[in-house]
Image (cartoon, coloured by chain):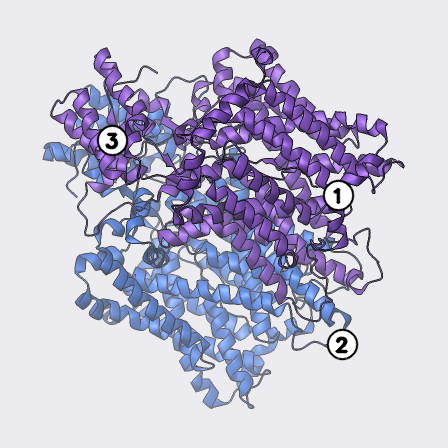
Chain colours: A purple, B blue
Amino acid sequence: MDGLKTPFKGIISDVKGRLACYKQDWTEACYGLRILAPTAYIFFASALPVIAFGEQLSRETDGSLSTVETLASTALCGIIHSIFGGQPLLILGVAEPTVIMYTYLYNFSKGRPDLGRELFLAWAGWVCVWTALMLFLLAIFNACTIITRFTRIAGELFGMLICVLFMQEAIKGVVSEFSIPKAEDPKEEKYQFQWLYTNGLLAVIFSFGVLYTALKSRGSRSWPYGTGWLRSFIADYGVPLMVVLWTALSYVVPGKIPSGVPRRLFCPLPWDAESLYHWTVIKDMGKVPVTYILIAIIPAVMIAGLYFFDHSVASQMAQQKEYNLKNPSAYHYDMLLLGAMTLLCGVLGLPPSNGVLPQSPMHTRSLAVLKRQLIRKKMVKSAKECIKRQASNSEIYGQMEAVFIEMDTSQTNNSVDKELENLKEAVMKREDGGDENGKFDPEKHIDAHLPVRVNEQRGSNLLQSALVGAAVCVIPVIRMIPTSVLWGYFAYMAIDSLPGNQFWERLLLLFITPGRRFKVLAGVHASFVETVPFKYIASFTLFQLAYFLVCFGITWIPIAGILFPLPFFILISIREHILPKFFSQQHLHELDAAEYEESAGVPMRSGSLSCRDTDETMDEDVSSQEILDEMTTRRGELKFRSVSISERHHQVFPDQS
Amino acid sequence: MDGLKTPFKGIISDVKGRLACYKQDWTEACYGLRILAPTAYIFFASALPVIAFGEQLSRETDGSLSTVETLASTALCGIIHSIFGGQPLLILGVAEPTVIMYTYLYNFSKGRPDLGRELFLAWAGWVCVWTALMLFLLAIFNACTIITRFTRIAGELFGMLICVLFMQEAIKGVVSEFSIPKAEDPKEEKYQFQWLYTNGLLAVIFSFGVLYTALKSRGSRSWPYGTGWLRSFIADYGVPLMVVLWTALSYVVPGKIPSGVPRRLFCPLPWDAESLYHWTVIKDMGKVPVTYILIAIIPAVMIAGLYFFDHSVASQMAQQKEYNLKNPSAYHYDMLLLGAMTLLCGVLGLPPSNGVLPQSPMHTRSLAVLKRQLIRKKMVKSAKECIKRQASNSEIYGQMEAVFIEMDTSQTNNSVDKELENLKEAVMKREDGGDENGKFDPEKHIDAHLPVRVNEQRGSNLLQSALVGAAVCVIPVIRMIPTSVLWGYFAYMAIDSLPGNQFWERLLLLFITPGRRFKVLAGVHASFVETVPFKYIASFTLFQLAYFLVCFGITWIPIAGILFPLPFFILISIREHILPKFFSQQHLHELDAAEYEESAGVPMRSGSLSCRDTDETMDEDVSSQEILDEMTTRRGELKFRSVSISERHHQVFPDQS
């Protein structure tokens, strides 16, 4: 709580830090072509969910808000953030928590005669005003220093909740295709039983088709077939491609079927009266009764809490240590800016945007220039040669540095020293220790400390936000997408988010009989599997599951459901004060680890292939994107692949750690 | 051609050999419960395709033959073979080649005014008469001695043709669900456009549903989840279960849909006039004009060739060396009996049955009593202990024999010596050699020579055939299956047959860029990948592909298509005389190997897990069925997992081979 004594301290230091590299942020972007691929990649990754959330919001709010507004908010906030924001790697967008909160807000105001559907946006504007105020306070009083208390348990529980809500939305969506939408005329031809049923069956086919093909294309990077370019293309753009493909397929239904089957997205055009109303929401805000203005504080607390959490975590994930970013972070200043943007969205009648996962770390990753595999090979080779001829550690480091400089084609060579700092330390430290255990092991240490270069600039974020803005103009094209394709996409988002979620992985572990656990150990597995006894894993997971069911239950309560973020805030103090009474510190540290650590089940033996004589050249065609994919969870976290403990026992020079 | 000089030699020796164990074949079966599980397993594995082929035949012959006849033929021939047959492990059934030949026969006779639909079965009866005659001659003149000339290339080409024909049937089937069957009244309600389209959409859903769930359940044995019993149950009965499940789901369509949507199997009841006609086919055979009786020789040559090939190969696969069968083979006698059964089916107007793949080797496998994993562990352990205390090889073998006898609970202990013969030889041989290279390596040699016990008897085959016969009586239940479920099942049969087909695997290999071939080497892979240069693999595969396209093309020719087995017979002499001119003997031997050999990419390290200290007991819960699954291709062949060549180089005691 030291933050309270020094208001503005964080913001000022953030602003100073970012100002120093602001010009460079733009000059770097001007190198041009290199940022185009990441821009396109992030645009699709961020526009698709925003469209899906728009459709969801449109159904939940009877059309008060729709895809037009979610796209507009995402574009507006994205452009503001990419120009004025502290951390330009952070991607903003309307996210699922916002959609859920707005759904509660709508249901609340619909039920009050003195608010009603008419004043919903005006009242939501007041919620945004309060939210902005709270975000300002959080920023001013340096609250972002406490984000380290948001441990894995709360984050993964929240991720799981979003996943289940996505799945619920997908199922509800497909089921709804079999019935007549409430606002429609049941006498229309397309709502006669036979066409209704046809619509439903088509929805089943399209949604499962999208789900299956999207999941398959997601893993294309590691296919053995096809050229690297093709595989990368499918992996990067497969999901939007599948949406396009299934949309195209939806147009091959025979002409005898009445129009409106299959159903397609419904959203007003941006130049329709409904959309234009948003410019005048601010005038209606005065009409909201004072009681409701005060009541708005309750949802505002929830939203502020959610945004504080989400925005910081997304920002943190975009700036993970392993990316070796050169420019400083700006959590406090970005929180202030988020407040300002929330205020702006509120008065414009738009749902606010915040930092999104997994797009933010995806953005950083797509900008990473990683010749890791290649550099690594050469460095290990030179290090091994040095060791063979009994060179000193300084010589070894010198040699490796030379290789690194030779291989690195980036313009700014002067920062090499800084980037290799960790590696240097690792090599040199061993000099002093001198005992066998501390001996420098090239394979291990180079892997852990090898730098990644990220092209830090504001161009890609600005461009992709502008593209999202442009998408508002192509709403007529977006309206061609069948709703069932979106339900499939929701299911895809749900399933795709599960691998890498340790809560999910531990749940699965509970279904493995003791005799089959060797299967887990034989594959790549989270390291807690080896270090924590099963009964503690099981009880920790069951506690988390019970807590999860409570959280999920709350979302079903009609109006009090708005308090659904509350258990997450409570969980943070449960984690700090109650859990340590039931679990040992060490186990808790492993189960609720800050970093995603996994062990390779079978030792990697890439070397054994290259030393063989074959007719073919065996150049390993592994793109850096693929390595990054393997190193990254679906949430965008970097994983640490450590040597399996059982392997460590077999090593000649076991490590102390 | 020595066989011509000694007619009946093969048959007499077969009969003598089998008579000696005939009584035992029945007494072994009386141990009862042990054969029930294999019986049920084989019944489902053999009845489902027969039902599917029946429906296919019914469509192709406008109902002249249907599921009633295919089931009846399978049951009749199965019962005869299980009682009088030489090799009771061989499973008989109506197979796809028979269905294709009968389709050509029908199309031919339909087009001749003096045969027509009426005399089709009578004429087919004559074809069977000629076929039977040729099979008799083949049996009498010991033709089965040449089956070793049927190498992998012809067998896999034929397997691929069947696979493609299955897929074609599945696609044709699903497409046909969108249109009105030719013989039906297009005015019926269920054939109005909206219901026709609904029927088509339901067909897409059901067939993909069956395909996906059947493929998934097939692999359940290696799931990490669930108990071993459940996993085995799903793996063994998953496919029939899925057929039942999707059939049940087809009944939840709303009541407003007219009956007949979705379409269900159409076959007459066994007591309908159409089915009863078959008993009088023999009377019509006299009405067939003499010219057509003579023309019948041409298809008879084709069918005899196909049956000779199929029956022998199925029988061979059911008696692979690695199963360590105690009773002798009976190829010649079984061929004679097949002729007799073909004759019987012909005069009864039934399509004949022959030995089927993969059911025959599946049958042997399901009867194998394999405590391999358990025995192996103990034997390796005891052998290693002996080696540690410098015991002689005779001591080592004695110790291992003791463990084997202790673990083996079967009644006939007197045959242990014979079964362990190979192992004994392997251990003892090393004694003489004495040099480092020939040293006895427990891990390797025990694995290669460990015996499998097969419960050889006639009970399971008789029982499953009787069950197929009983299925004729439950035709009303079978008629509940939607046709679309069968199309999905055809697609499943096609896809399920591909893994393990080296032709297919080599085709896939062509799509892997050189830089990615390490992926193949890293996984379990066929050994030719390491031993034959890629350009030879590619040219061999391209030749095979071109030849395959010719064969597939022939099946499309209206009446001459009946000659489709011809290229396969020709291929055998191409393989013998022409291919050796283009490929070296060694490469040809690897690419067209008699045995399925594969190399493990990554060395197995099961030992490293068990030597660790953990809280849990790490008993490896691997059922013997699972190991057998892994050791067997989808066609039922046993694989040989050798040590990868790259690994051999690293071994301390490299093998000479």
Q: Where residue B249 sits: x, y (%)?
A: 68, 52
Name the residue that disc number 2 marks.
B187
Q: Quadrant of the C terminus of chain B?
A: top left
Mark 2 Cα-neighbour bin, 10 Å: few <14, some 14–19, many ≥20: few
Mark 1 — on which chain does it sit? Answer: A
Q: Quadrant of the N terminus of chain B?
A: bottom left
A415 vs A512, nearest the viewer: A415
Q: Is residue B288 visible?
A: yes
Name the residue located 55 percent from the left edge and 78 percent from the top edge.
B121
Q: Amino acid at mark 3?
A: Pro
Question: Is B373 located above or below residue A61 in the figure?
Answer: above
Label drawn at residue B442:
3
Write down the quadrant of residue A609 in the picture: top left
Query: In what element is the residue under mark 1?
Result: helix
Q: Amino acid at mark 2?
A: Lys
Name the residue located 59 percent from the left edge and 72 percent from the top edge.
B59
Write down the quadrant of residue B97 in the picture: bottom left
Name the residue located 62 percent from the left edge and 15 percent from the top edge.
A574
Mark 3 — on which chain does it sit? Answer: B
Mark 1 Cα-neighbour bin, 10 Å: few <14, some 14–19, many ≥20: some
The total number of labels drawn is 3
Q: Does label 3 lie on the same chain as label 1?
A: no
Question: Is A450 located above or below residue B641 in the figure?
Answer: above
Which residue in the rendered view is the most extreme toward the right?
A: A113
First-in-chain label (2 vs 3): 2
Q: Disc 1 versus disc 3: distance between alpha carbons?
A: 68 Å
Mark 2 — on which chain does it sit? Answer: B
Q: Amino acid at mark 1?
A: Glu
Name the residue that disc number 1 marks.
A60
Write down the quadrant of residue B406 in the picture: top left
A592 vs A122, nearest the viewer: A122
The mark closer to the camera, 2 or 3, is 2
